[in-house]
Amino acid sequence: MYYPRLIDSYLEEWASRETHKPLLLRGARQVGKSTAVRHLAERFENYVEINFEKQASYIPLFQVKDIDVNKIVSQIAAMAGKRIVPGKTLLFLDEVQACPESIMSLWFFKEDLPELHVVAAGSLLEFALEDLPSFGVGRIHSMFMFPMTFDEFLIANGEQLLIEARNGASSSQPLPQPLYEKLVGLTRTFMLVGGMPEAVAKWVETHDYLACQEIQDDIVVTYEDDFPKYRKKIDPTLLRNTMRSVAVQVTDKFVFSAVEGNYKAAEVKKALDMLTKAGIVIPVTHTDGNGLPLGSEADKSYQKMMLLDTGLMLRLLNMTTGDISEFTEQILTSDVADLVNKGPMAEMLAGLELLHYRTPNIRHEIYYWQRQAKNSQAEVDYLSSYRQTVLPIEVKAEKQGGMKSLWIFLRERKLTNAIRCSLENFGAFDYQDPEDSGAFRHVQICPLYAISQMDSVLKAFNW
């Protein structure tokens, strides 16, 4: 059964254009790229799929001195036994990193056979692209895909009506208590199951956390089995230890020396870079946040690291520590304040959701702020932008007085509006800053289960 994905509408829009570039679908292994393309194929009369890892016999078709895509397409049709008709056929080239020449051919598809819909994808694609710096700039369209969002998880579980009710709520009209409690419970479940499509499907089928954990363990092992395939020479043990250290250090400033094995900082940095390219690790970079763009003041020597999925993070923690029963119990039974304020899961979930709901057409960066002054612990979890203004986003539960970091940032940057992500109901409040002549700060609460509705929440501000 196919569970709808947010990227579906972007793929369909690409397919419906009168003029379209070949599409490169990028993302980590097992986030659902191939399944999404097969779903897209249902709108075409014909569909031809080539997986270069499984069907190596197709590779020589692309390993020619002079690339003639019309000739290649006719040869593919003959081998596959299916007609390939421009405008009526979707040609899917999967695991293209196993055949770099196929990536180069995309440029010629745009020039010589523009009517044909061609999608290419690959799990270790970024490493192949490093070796092809001019693979088709301006002639190939990229989309980036991630694990399932909370909304996609809800849809897979048949909760469309719950989504509609949530989307109709606001700070002035919060959710009724039964619906609020149901969403909090589903958020707890999502933290444990995560968004890897196979794990979500297993949850929908069984509602068995242990069955989902088996899937997650298999995915982690698959990632680790990929490490020797990474193009640059690097110790697979270093990659494995770095990935597991990310799970341990998640939402904290990453400390290179904490990686097991006494590796040099430069070696760990290289491993992090490769895990980032593979889509497994997502950096959150410090910025001073004085203005836009946020990247202009980014400092990559201060970074936090997230894993691509909460469920996989828990499995990596279990592989590292040997026991996460207390962590799991906290997710399932803690009151909402403790769950948000006393653990990394809520902060990581918020960061992933903020990333996943952005347009897939470009690679997005994520930022946070940390006060650099000595003996200062001030930190704002995420910085974003809205209407040409810096937008601080704090992951906290209740206790306005406990949000000192947020008040410091707003005061120093002369800002008025902020977002609090928590497991509260929809709401808003004003804070009169006693250290800034009683200036009012306005905070809208965007619940963790409603980050897809961030734009609607932001419209409540008087900008």
Image (cartoon, rainbow, N blue to C red):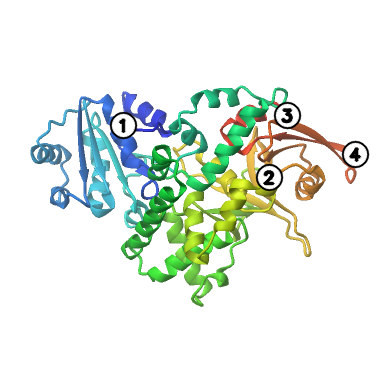
Identity, as a three-letter code, of the amino acid under mark 4: Gly
Label 4 sits on residue: 438
Q: Seen in the image, is 195 located left or right of residue 63?
A: right
Mark on residue 463?
3
Q: Amino acid at mark 1?
A: His
Distance of label 2 from label 1 (alpha carbons) = 40 Å
Q: Are marks 2 and 4 in contact (CB under 8 Å)?
A: no
Q: Is residue 145 left or right of residue 353?
A: left
Earlier in the chain: of badge 4 and badge 1, it is 1
* Residue 35 visible in this rendered orientation of the protein: yes
Expressed as whole percent of the image width and height from the top left, the position of residue 236 reads 38, 68
Q: Which residue is mark 1?
A: 39
- In terms of sequence position, does the residue under pointer 2 or pointer 1 come before the other? 1
**Residue 81, label in figure:** none
Asked if the residue under mark 2 is in contact with the one under mark 3, i.e. CB atoms within 8 Å, the reply is: no
How far across and down, in percent of the image, does residue 320 sit?
Answer: 50, 65
Between 182 and 248, the one lying in front of the other is 182
Q: Residues within 10 Å of mark 3 (few under 14, many from 20)?
A: few
**Residue tagged by mark 2?**
335
Q: Name the spot of residue 166 as percent of width and height, x first.
A: 59, 26
- The label nearer to you, 2 versus 1, is 2
Q: Nearer the viewer, mark 1 or mark 3?
A: 1
Q: Quadrant of residue 372?
A: bottom right
Question: Where's the N terminus, which quadrant?
Answer: top left
